[in-house]
Image: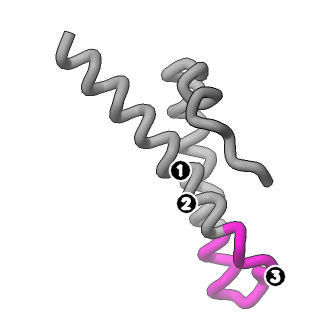
Amino acid sequence: MAHPKAAEVRKLTDADITEQIDGIRRELFDLRFQQATRQLSNTHRFKESRTKLAQLLTVQKERSRSAAAS
């Protein structure tokens, strides 16, 4: 799974970013549950999901700060 570039994430609307953040948080919850029950086979998905979540949250925070400054 390739990580989206920051420019690609910035092209998304606020609603799309929020939707993706919710989806990734659900995915991380499911991954933790699978790991706890020893059903998780590819643990690298944790890092990928956390990285993508951080990228989305960063763009969301940038937008909220720029809106507050304006």
Q: Which amino acid does the dot numbered 3 rest on?
A: Ser
At mark 1, the secondary structure is helix
Q: Residue shown at 54%/43% (left/top)?
A: 21
41 left or right, relative to 59: right
Residue 50 image point, x, y percent: 55, 60
Name the residue at the bottom extreme. 38
Q: Which amino acid does the dot numbered 2 rest on?
A: Arg
Within-10-Å neighbours for mark 2: few <14, some 14–19, many 20+? some
67 falls in the magenta region = no
Label 3 belongs to which residue?
A: 41
Q: CA distance from mark 3 to mark 2?
A: 17 Å
Q: Which residues are magenta?
A: 31-45
Q: Residue shown at 60%/63% (left/top)?
A: 28
Name the residue at the top extreme. 70
Q: CA distance from mark 2 to mark 1?
A: 5 Å
Q: Quadrant of the N terminus?
A: bottom right
Pointer 1 or 3: first along the chain: 3
Pointer 3 or 2: first along the chain: 3
Q: Residue shown at 60%/55% (left/top)?
A: 26
Label 1 belongs to which residue?
A: 53
At mark 3, the secondary structure is loop
Q: Quadrant of residue 5?
A: top right
Label 2 belongs to which residue?
A: 50
Q: Which amino acid does the dot numbered 1 rest on?
A: Leu
Residue 32 image point, x, y percent: 60, 75
- Asked if the residues shown at circle 1 and circle 3 are in contact, with their CB atoms under 8 angstroms apart, the answer is no
